[in-house]
Amino acid sequence: MIAGTALVFVGTRDLIESHIGQSVAAHNFKAPAPPVARPVPRIHPGDTVAKLSIPRLNTQLYVIEGDDERELRRGPGHLPGTVMPGARGNSVIAGHRDTHFRVLRGIRKGDDIVLQTSAGQFLYRVRRTDIVPPTDTSSLQPSSTPVLHLITCYPFHYVGAAPKRFVVEASLAGQVTRLE
């Protein structure tokens, strides 16, 4: 009975923290401002760096800088060391399968992903999805073209540490707006 109560408590805590984290991230998100000469802002772990939308799945999530447990409880995390959305290279965003990235179970080839950052709004189109072992790090490798990888654990309805990873690969399809 104690173990069951503990599991319910942890699950409830994670859901509450994910909702509160997204509310705080939405409040902290700075939408693009009109172009003016300004220094590039420094990004710190925990900063809200993007708004991620998947129109077909009616989803809007705020992306947090960082990939440790604290950031991932608040929202999907942009992996430090990867490029920001819209830039040339590989931008990687990871999230928990049982909270924010549960929606990825419904994503499919051809879906649009829109990422809004302080630099503008960028449209990505899903090229493929894949299920890989955790040792497969090919989705983290640098790229010479603008690409986006969304990563979560798999299967979606698994209790405990999931044995695989679900990877969404999308390529930059266009710029909705870009601020310089």
Image (tube, helix red, strand yellow):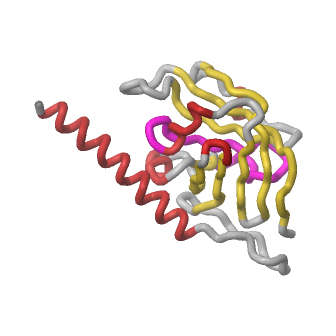
* Position of residue 66 in the picture relative to residue 7 (left or right): right
**The furthest residue to the left:** 1
Give the answer, above or below, for where 4 lies relative to 67: above
Give residue 144's position: percent from left, percent from top: 88, 39
The one of 132 and 39 positioned closer to us in this rendering = 132
Residue at 59%, 41% in the rendered image: 94
Q: Is residue 97 magenta?
A: yes
Q: Main secondary structure of the magenta part?
A: loop
Magenta residues span 80-99
Give residue 57's position: percent from left, percent from top: 61, 42
Which image quadrant for residue 173? Answer: top right
Give the answer, above or below, for where 94 lies relative to 45: above
Q: Quadrant of the N terminus?
A: top left
Give residue 154's position: percent from left, percent from top: 52, 25
Residue at 46%, 24% in the rendered image: 162
Residue at 60%, 21% in the rendered image: 135
Which image quadrant for residue 44? Answer: bottom right
Q: Is residue 169 magenta?
A: no
Q: Quadrant of the C terminus?
A: bottom right
Which image quadrant for residue 136? Answer: top right
The one of 173 and 29 positioned closer to us in this rendering = 173
Give residue 73's position: percent from left, percent from top: 44, 49
Residue at 69%, 31% in the rendered image: 108
Across the whole image, how many numbered discs are drawn on residues? Answer: 0
